[in-house]
Amino acid sequence: MNNYSPFDFSEEEITVAAAVERLLSIEIEFTRECNYRCPYCYVGDPNNNSREMSPRQIDETIRQAAELGARKVVILGGEPLLYPRLEEKLALIKACGMRAEIFTNSMLIDDAMAQLLWNYRCRVVIKLNSLDPAVQERMTGQPGALDIVMRAIATLRRVGYDDDSLLGASSVICSENLNDIVELWQWLRENRIRPYFETLTPQGRLQQNAHLQVSPAAAETV
Protein backbone atom coordinates (compact mmCIF):
# COMPACT_ATOMS: atom_id res chain seq x y z
CA MET A 1 0.00 0.00 0.00
CA ASN A 2 1.29 3.45 -0.84
CA ASN A 3 2.30 5.82 1.93
CA TYR A 4 0.35 9.07 1.67
CA SER A 5 2.51 11.32 3.84
CA PRO A 6 -0.13 13.79 5.07
CA PHE A 7 -2.02 10.96 6.78
CA ASP A 8 0.16 7.87 7.09
CA PHE A 9 3.51 7.46 8.77
CA SER A 10 6.37 5.11 8.06
CA GLU A 11 8.05 3.09 10.81
CA GLU A 12 11.07 5.37 10.48
CA GLU A 13 8.95 8.50 10.97
CA ILE A 14 7.31 6.97 14.03
CA THR A 15 10.68 5.95 15.51
CA VAL A 16 12.16 9.41 14.98
CA ALA A 17 9.11 11.17 16.40
CA ALA A 18 9.16 8.98 19.50
CA ALA A 19 12.89 9.58 20.01
CA VAL A 20 12.49 13.36 20.00
CA GLU A 21 9.10 13.30 21.78
CA ARG A 22 7.28 14.85 18.84
CA LEU A 23 3.66 14.28 17.82
CA LEU A 24 2.60 12.93 14.44
CA SER A 25 -1.16 13.06 15.00
CA ILE A 26 -3.85 13.74 17.57
CA GLU A 27 -7.44 12.61 18.02
CA ILE A 28 -10.08 15.12 19.01
CA GLU A 29 -13.86 15.20 19.54
CA PHE A 30 -15.62 18.37 18.39
CA THR A 31 -18.98 17.12 19.70
CA ARG A 32 -20.56 14.15 21.41
CA GLU A 33 -23.91 14.68 19.71
CA CYS A 34 -24.90 11.98 17.24
CA ASN A 35 -27.80 11.16 14.95
CA TYR A 36 -27.15 7.40 15.12
CA ARG A 37 -27.42 5.03 18.06
CA CYS A 38 -24.82 2.33 17.54
CA PRO A 39 -25.17 -0.42 20.19
CA TYR A 40 -21.40 -0.59 20.71
CA CYS A 41 -20.70 3.17 20.94
CA TYR A 42 -18.21 4.15 23.64
CA VAL A 43 -20.25 7.27 24.41
CA GLY A 44 -22.61 6.07 27.13
CA ASP A 45 -25.09 8.94 26.93
CA PRO A 46 -24.91 11.08 23.76
CA ASN A 47 -27.19 13.66 25.38
CA ASN A 48 -24.66 14.36 28.12
CA ASN A 49 -22.35 16.91 26.55
CA SER A 50 -20.92 18.26 29.79
CA ARG A 51 -17.44 17.01 28.89
CA GLU A 52 -17.30 18.64 25.46
CA MET A 53 -14.44 20.99 24.73
CA SER A 54 -15.24 24.64 24.13
CA PRO A 55 -14.41 26.17 20.73
CA ARG A 56 -11.49 28.00 22.34
CA GLN A 57 -10.13 24.80 23.88
CA ILE A 58 -10.37 23.07 20.51
CA ASP A 59 -8.43 25.90 18.86
CA GLU A 60 -5.74 25.79 21.54
CA THR A 61 -5.42 22.02 21.21
CA ILE A 62 -5.05 22.22 17.43
CA ARG A 63 -2.40 24.93 17.65
CA GLN A 64 -0.46 23.10 20.35
CA ALA A 65 -0.52 19.90 18.32
CA ALA A 66 0.94 21.74 15.35
CA GLU A 67 3.65 23.24 17.54
CA LEU A 68 4.54 19.74 18.71
CA GLY A 69 4.96 18.56 15.12
CA ALA A 70 1.64 16.88 14.35
CA ARG A 71 0.71 16.47 10.70
CA LYS A 72 -2.75 14.97 11.14
CA VAL A 73 -5.82 15.71 13.25
CA VAL A 74 -8.24 12.79 13.57
CA ILE A 75 -11.75 14.13 14.21
CA LEU A 76 -14.05 11.77 16.08
CA GLY A 77 -17.39 12.04 17.85
CA GLY A 78 -20.27 11.86 18.35
CA GLU A 79 -20.92 12.78 14.75
CA PRO A 80 -18.38 15.41 13.63
CA LEU A 81 -20.54 16.66 10.75
CA LEU A 82 -23.13 17.85 13.28
CA TYR A 83 -20.64 20.34 14.71
CA PRO A 84 -21.80 23.83 13.65
CA ARG A 85 -18.27 25.27 13.48
CA LEU A 86 -16.76 22.44 11.47
CA GLU A 87 -15.52 24.55 8.56
CA GLU A 88 -13.93 27.05 10.95
CA LYS A 89 -11.95 24.26 12.61
CA LEU A 90 -10.96 22.68 9.29
CA ALA A 91 -9.65 26.07 8.19
CA LEU A 92 -7.57 26.33 11.37
CA ILE A 93 -6.16 22.83 10.90
CA LYS A 94 -5.13 23.76 7.36
CA ALA A 95 -3.66 27.10 8.48
CA CYS A 96 -1.55 25.22 11.01
CA GLY A 97 -0.10 23.05 8.24
CA MET A 98 -1.99 19.88 9.12
CA ARG A 99 -4.64 17.71 7.48
CA ALA A 100 -7.93 16.42 8.92
CA GLU A 101 -9.15 12.83 8.96
CA ILE A 102 -12.87 12.66 9.81
CA PHE A 103 -14.75 9.59 11.04
CA THR A 104 -18.42 9.99 10.14
CA ASN A 105 -21.56 7.88 9.92
CA SER A 106 -22.07 9.68 6.54
CA MET A 107 -25.73 10.58 7.08
CA LEU A 108 -25.07 14.31 6.55
CA ILE A 109 -22.93 13.93 3.44
CA ASP A 110 -24.74 15.75 0.65
CA ASP A 111 -23.22 17.59 -2.31
CA ALA A 112 -22.37 20.68 -0.26
CA MET A 113 -20.77 18.73 2.60
CA ALA A 114 -18.80 16.53 0.20
CA GLN A 115 -17.46 19.63 -1.55
CA LEU A 116 -16.50 21.20 1.77
CA LEU A 117 -14.55 18.12 2.83
CA TRP A 118 -12.89 17.91 -0.58
CA ASN A 119 -11.92 21.58 -0.52
CA TYR A 120 -9.86 20.88 2.61
CA ARG A 121 -8.69 17.51 1.24
CA CYS A 122 -9.95 15.76 4.35
CA ARG A 123 -9.65 12.02 4.55
CA VAL A 124 -13.19 10.77 5.11
CA VAL A 125 -13.76 7.49 6.96
CA ILE A 126 -17.37 6.32 6.81
CA LYS A 127 -19.12 3.82 9.10
CA LEU A 128 -19.77 0.54 7.29
CA ASN A 129 -20.14 -2.62 9.35
CA SER A 130 -21.88 -4.87 6.84
CA LEU A 131 -23.13 -5.13 3.28
CA ASP A 132 -26.26 -6.77 4.68
CA PRO A 133 -28.89 -4.02 5.04
CA ALA A 134 -30.42 -5.58 8.16
CA VAL A 135 -27.08 -5.91 9.93
CA GLN A 136 -25.96 -2.41 8.99
CA GLU A 137 -29.27 -1.08 10.33
CA ARG A 138 -28.99 -2.97 13.63
CA MET A 139 -25.40 -1.85 14.09
CA THR A 140 -26.26 1.83 13.64
CA GLY A 141 -29.79 2.05 14.98
CA GLN A 142 -30.66 3.91 11.78
CA PRO A 143 -33.30 2.70 9.28
CA GLY A 144 -31.91 2.49 5.76
CA ALA A 145 -28.34 2.89 6.99
CA LEU A 146 -26.79 0.90 4.14
CA ASP A 147 -28.56 3.00 1.51
CA ILE A 148 -27.37 6.13 3.32
CA VAL A 149 -23.73 5.10 3.27
CA MET A 150 -23.87 3.97 -0.37
CA ARG A 151 -25.34 7.32 -1.39
CA ALA A 152 -22.61 9.07 0.58
CA ILE A 153 -19.90 7.09 -1.21
CA ALA A 154 -21.40 8.04 -4.58
CA THR A 155 -21.61 11.69 -3.54
CA LEU A 156 -18.00 11.70 -2.36
CA ARG A 157 -16.90 10.08 -5.62
CA ARG A 158 -18.48 12.89 -7.61
CA VAL A 159 -16.30 15.56 -6.00
CA GLY A 160 -13.04 13.63 -6.28
CA TYR A 161 -12.84 10.89 -3.66
CA ASP A 162 -11.86 8.20 -6.13
CA ASP A 163 -9.18 6.18 -4.31
CA ASP A 164 -8.23 4.97 -0.85
CA SER A 165 -5.78 7.79 -0.13
CA LEU A 166 -8.70 9.94 1.02
CA LEU A 167 -11.64 7.54 1.45
CA GLY A 168 -11.89 4.84 4.10
CA ALA A 169 -14.46 2.78 5.98
CA SER A 170 -14.59 2.10 9.71
CA SER A 171 -15.88 -1.36 10.64
CA VAL A 172 -16.13 -3.17 13.95
CA ILE A 173 -15.72 -6.92 14.24
CA CYS A 174 -18.67 -8.30 16.19
CA SER A 175 -21.07 -11.24 16.42
CA GLU A 176 -23.45 -9.56 13.96
CA ASN A 177 -20.98 -9.39 11.07
CA LEU A 178 -18.34 -11.98 11.93
CA ASN A 179 -19.21 -14.27 9.04
CA ASP A 180 -19.27 -11.36 6.58
CA ILE A 181 -15.97 -9.71 7.46
CA VAL A 182 -13.96 -11.25 4.61
CA GLU A 183 -16.60 -10.29 2.04
CA LEU A 184 -16.71 -6.74 3.40
CA TRP A 185 -12.91 -6.42 3.31
CA GLN A 186 -12.77 -7.64 -0.27
CA TRP A 187 -15.57 -5.28 -1.33
CA LEU A 188 -13.80 -2.30 0.21
CA ARG A 189 -10.49 -3.11 -1.47
CA GLU A 190 -12.18 -3.70 -4.83
CA ASN A 191 -13.93 -0.33 -4.53
CA ARG A 192 -10.79 1.59 -3.57
CA ILE A 193 -11.88 2.25 0.02
CA ARG A 194 -9.33 1.83 2.79
CA PRO A 195 -10.51 -0.63 5.50
CA TYR A 196 -10.27 0.36 9.16
CA PHE A 197 -11.24 -2.78 11.08
CA GLU A 198 -11.27 -2.85 14.88
CA THR A 199 -12.38 -5.05 17.74
CA LEU A 200 -14.88 -3.83 20.31
CA THR A 201 -13.93 -2.27 23.63
CA PRO A 202 -16.27 -3.08 26.56
CA GLN A 203 -17.42 0.42 27.43
CA GLY A 204 -20.36 2.74 26.83
CA ARG A 205 -23.39 1.05 25.26
CA LEU A 206 -21.51 -2.18 24.68
CA GLN A 207 -21.87 -2.93 28.36
CA GLN A 208 -25.60 -3.43 27.71
CA ASN A 209 -24.94 -5.32 24.46
CA ALA A 210 -22.26 -7.77 25.45
CA HIS A 211 -23.61 -10.33 22.96
CA LEU A 212 -21.89 -8.34 20.21
CA GLN A 213 -18.41 -9.20 21.46
CA VAL A 214 -16.43 -12.04 19.90
CA SER A 215 -13.45 -13.81 21.39
CA PRO A 216 -10.01 -13.59 19.76
CA ALA A 217 -10.23 -17.31 19.05
CA ALA A 218 -13.54 -16.87 17.20
CA ALA A 219 -12.16 -13.95 15.18
CA GLU A 220 -9.14 -16.00 14.12
CA THR A 221 -11.38 -18.62 12.52
CA VAL A 222 -12.81 -16.18 9.98
Image (spheres, rainbow, N blue to C red):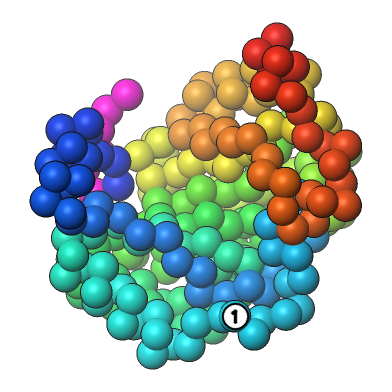
Identity, as a three-letter code, of the amino acid under mark 1? Arg
Res 159 seen here: no
Q: Is residue 214 left or right of residue 98?
A: right
Which of the 4 image quadrants contains residue 204?
bottom right
Residue 203's spot in the image, x, y percent? 72, 53
Residue 42: image location, x then y, percent: 68, 57
Horizontal side of 126 relative to 146 (left or right) equals left
Q: In the image, which residues are magenta? A: 1-6
Q: Is residue 145 magenta?
A: no
- Between 141 and 119, the one nearer to me in the picture: 141
The correct choice, above or below, for 108 with respect to 132 in the image is below
The residue located at (74%, 17%) in the rendering is 218
Say which element carries label 1: loop
In the picture, residue 115 is in which quadrant? bottom left
Residue 78 to residue 198: above or below = below
From the viewer's perspective, is 183 left or right of 214? left
- In front of the other: 58 or 152: 58
Q: Residue furthest top?
A: 221
Q: Main secondary structure of the magenta part?
A: loop
Residue receiving disc 1: 51
Where does the image place residue 210, in percent across and percent down from the top left?
A: 85, 42
Left or right position of 202 against 196: right
Where, quadrant-wise, is the C terminus in this rendering?
top right
Residue at image x 50%, y 24%? Answer: 189
Q: Residue 32: x percent and y percent?
A: 63, 72
